[in-house]
Amino acid sequence: MENVLLVEDAEELGELLKEELGAHGYNITWVTNGVDAVIAALDKKFDVLIVDMITPNLKGIDTIKIIKKIDPKIAIIACSGMIDKSIMIDVTKAGASACVNKPFTVSQMISQIKWATRNKGGLLSE
Amino acid sequence: MLHPLQLSVANDMTDEEFRLFKQLVYDECGINFKPEKKAFLQNRTIQRMKATDVKSYYRYYKLITDANTGKAELLSFLDVLTINETSFFRNKPQLDLFQYSILPEIISKKRMKNDFTLKIWSAGCSTGQEPYTIAIILNELMTDIKGWKVSILASDLSMTALEAAQQGAYPREKMEGVEASHLKKYFTEKDEHFYAKDELKRLVIFDFHNLMYDNGFSNLDVIFCRNVLIYFDSQTQKQVIETFHQCLAPKGYLFLGHAESLQGINESFIFIHKNKGTAYQMR
Ligand SMILES: C[S@@+](CC[C@H](N)C(=O)[O-])C[C@H]1O[C@@H](n2cnc3c(N)ncnc32)[C@H](O)[C@@H]1O
């Protein structure tokens, strides 16, 4: 069973993802801001990081960079209400394997998780 | 094995960590840390991390932002970040303008109106030298001061500075700027320290106050806020000056530090300039 760290400050979406992904066999740790995500990653090993790009205190991109430093092997999925090219490039450089546009369905997210865990090191690591 | 980030006390703050703390400090008290001040912010943060036995920047951030249990440590954190540099009779030309032009005018107008109250606010009073200086000036100028209701409200964000202010005890080297006759008249000397006498102390009310928040003051005759705004960006300066504007009496006066000005910040004040002393008066 894969450990997923979910960073989402929108309460309903966080709640929903935790429940639905949990029902699909993922072990979800849900936090609402970047600092809590970093602390969680320091305390426990995760396979997947799902991170909203706009969260309180640390920006999504910073959260990705820091957690990537803690665990270079973690699979990262960036979510955003509007992913434009420049964000896409930034998060890919930072080590994300997938970008998901909001809104998304649970099954879309699950396929992204599967894709991301297969490309763990990020798209840039050959 | 612990990840290096677990032990950031030993590490330099990363840019992400710096941005995180910088934003928090800005939101909490308006102090704007420029990138070149990173080492200062880092050193002071580490000082508090050691005191609280927290080993990583992120955990410390979490500690001070906890809505329930973080308030006290947040205050201690902001406290170590403040620069409390101050002195008696700082910026003498400005105080001369206050003592010999502005104050006499305020007083005579009030006497004519049979109004014997005087309210002055020292905002960002640090360790008390500014409000005690004002108290000396009032005592010197107002021979009938006993018949007045004088309050010098002195506030600061730093609890340690406020405690020192309240105590009103200063080592000899801090007394530079105070005339020998005033030293004798307004201070008691004991064990190499000078203690502010009751004549000064009874005029001053010290209180904790963060300039980011409302103060409940109104109808103030004069506000001193010197060498505080320099730590704020222009947006925060605007906001603070606007609250000053609200709590000053009509035609009230505002004194800023020599490196501070209202230019481009607020149009509701007239600039006064005399013998190198500067002040602002509400239109
Ligand atoms: C350099 S001292 C100036 C002291 C005195 N006014 C003078 O000119 O000598 C600046 C003071 O502003 C205080 N300060 C900084 N930010 C503040 C805030 N947001 N609210 C209240 N005081 C603040 C600091 O704690 C410090 O004591």
Image (cartoon, rainbow, N blue to C red):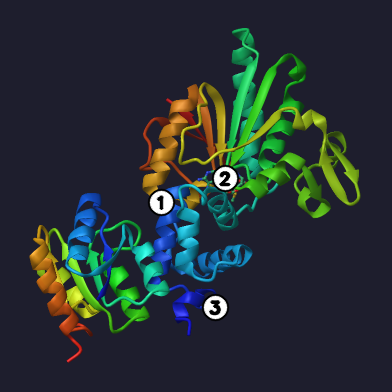
Q: Image check: B48 left or right of A8? A: right
Element under disc 1: loop
Q: Image check: A97 left or right of B281? A: left
Q: CA distance from mark 2 to mark 3?
A: 29 Å
Question: Mark 3 Cα within 10 Å, few/some/many (few <14, many 20+)?
Answer: few
Q: Residue at x 77, y 20 (%)?
A: B143
Q: Position of residue B215 (x, y in %)?
A: 50, 31
Q: Residue at x 41, y 74 (%)?
A: A42
Q: Nearer the viewer, mark 3 or mark 1?
A: 3
Q: Nearer the viewer, mark 2 or mark 1?
A: 2
Q: Position of residue A113 (x, y in %)?
A: 16, 74
Give the residue at mark 2.
B157
Q: Image check: B200 left or right of A32? A: right
**Nearer-the-camera pick, B225 or B156:** B156
Taking A101 as reference, is B214 above or below it?
above
Q: Residue at x 45, y 81 (%)?
A: B3
Give the residue at mark 3.
B10
Q: Position of residue B94 (x, y in %)?
A: 61, 39
Q: Residue at x 37, y 79 (%)?
A: A70
Question: Mark 2 Cα within 10 Å, few/some/many (few <14, many 20+)?
Answer: many
Q: Amino acid at mark 2?
A: Leu
**Nearer-the-camera pick, B173 or A89:** A89
Element under disc 3: helix
Residue B275, quarter of the rendered image: top right
Q: Amino acid at mark 1?
A: Asp
Taking B37 as reference, is B277 above or below it?
above
